[in-house]
Image (spheres, rainbow, N blue to C red):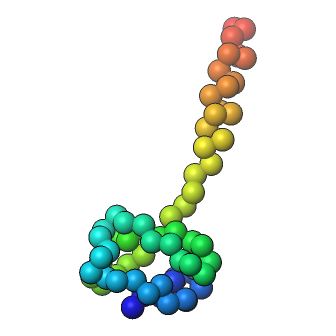
Amino acid sequence: MALCPECETDLDLDEDELEEGGIVSCPECGTDFEVVTVSPLELNPVEEYDEDEDEEASDEEDEESDY
Ligand SMILES: [Zn+2]
């Protein structure tokens, strides 16, 4: 049995089916967790990256060409 680190809902995970590096989602709060280790079970919240920010940053290279 594993509890969600965020909201302490019982995630009802089957530890036999988990593997390191796998992703589990909490049905209650919607947070995704990466399985760090299976035994003992350790979960790490997955941070979502903003892909939009990368695109904006690469736009500005042309503007500083007057030296
Ligand atoms: Zn949760």
x then y, percent, for residue 16: 27, 81
Comparing 29 with 61, the one in front is 29
Residue lying furthest top: 67
The mark total stands at 0
| Towards the viewer: 67 or 41 | 41
Identify the residue at horizontal 62%, vertical 78% (top origin).
29
Looking at the image, can residue 37 be seen?
no
Could you say where residue 45 lies in the image, as x and y percent from the top left? 50, 70
* Quadrant hosting residue 22: bottom left
Q: Is residue 50 visible?
A: yes
Looking at the picture, does residue 66 appear above or below residue 10? above
- For image coordinates 44% across by 87% down, the residue present is 12
Residue 15 image position (x, y, % from top left):
31, 82
State whether residue 45 is above or below residue 49: below
Which quarter of the figure has residue 1? Answer: bottom left
Which image quadrant is residue 42 in?
A: bottom left
Quadrant in the picture for the C terminus:
top right
Q: With 59 as the anchor, is 48 left or right in this view?
A: left
Ligand 1 is in which quadrant of the figure?
bottom right
